Image: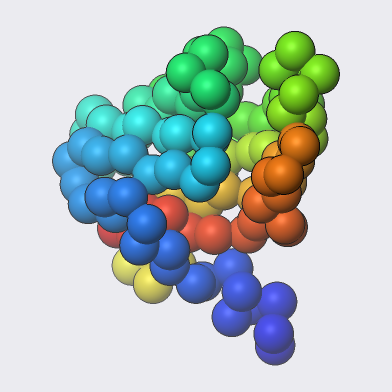
Amino acid sequence: MAAALSMASVQTKGTDTLPSGSWGIGPLVIHWSLKSQSEIDVEVSVFGIDVDELTATLSARNAKISDDIDILGIITGSIGLEARFAPGAKDNGLYLEGRLSGPGFDTGEMDFRIVPW
């Protein structure tokens, strides 16, 4: 039961609004723009450096992307994004999971719905 509550939690740091916005924690920033009712463009950067593997259009057919992060050996970890578009589902939205850390910085385990829809 606790895992289900964790997955449905909504973080409001940044702009958790549609059709576009951004969300950040430390050096990690996620930008999004809703393209249609079932597609959202996402772009991830760390220290302003784009993470190409985490720049994509998420849809019901391509709902998950993830990547291992290593920015100059300073910030390391693994993060993933998932978009949920189930008709009528209350947990639809853009989710972030994973962990990033570096000198004096650690996100801890992330499992956040950063944009509900």
Q: Is the C terminus in the top left, top right, bottom left or bottom right quadrant?
A: bottom left
Q: Residue at x 25, y 39 (%)?
A: 21
Q: How is the image coloured?
A: rainbow
Q: Measured from the top left, where is residue 66 in percent x and y? A: 68, 31
Q: Is residue 17 above or below residue 9?
A: above
Look at the picture and state if 38 lies above or below 54: below
Q: Residue at x 54, y 59 (%)?
A: 112
| Between 2 and 30, the one nearer to me in the picture | 30
Given the current orientation, which residue lies at the most extreme left position?
Answer: 19
Taking the image as drawn, is residue 60 in sight?
yes
**Residue 59: percent from left, percent from top:** 43, 34
The residue depicted at 81 percent of the width and 18 percent of the height is 73
**For residue 81, side relative to residue 19 (left or right):** right
Position of the N terminus by quadrant: bottom right
User: Residue sitting at 33 percent across and 33 percent down?
Assistant: 32
Q: Find the residue positioned furthest to the bottom.
A: 1
Q: Residue furthest front?
A: 104
Does residue 58 show up?
Answer: no
Q: Quadrant of residue 92?
A: bottom left
- Give coordinates of residue 86: x percent, y percent: 43, 57
Tell how many labels.
0
Q: Is residue 54 above or below residue 19?
A: above
Considering depth in this image, is 61 or 39 the residue closer to the camera? 39
Against 35, residue 18 (above or below) is below
Residue 20 place in picture, x, y as percent: 22, 37
Left-right relation of 11 to 21: right
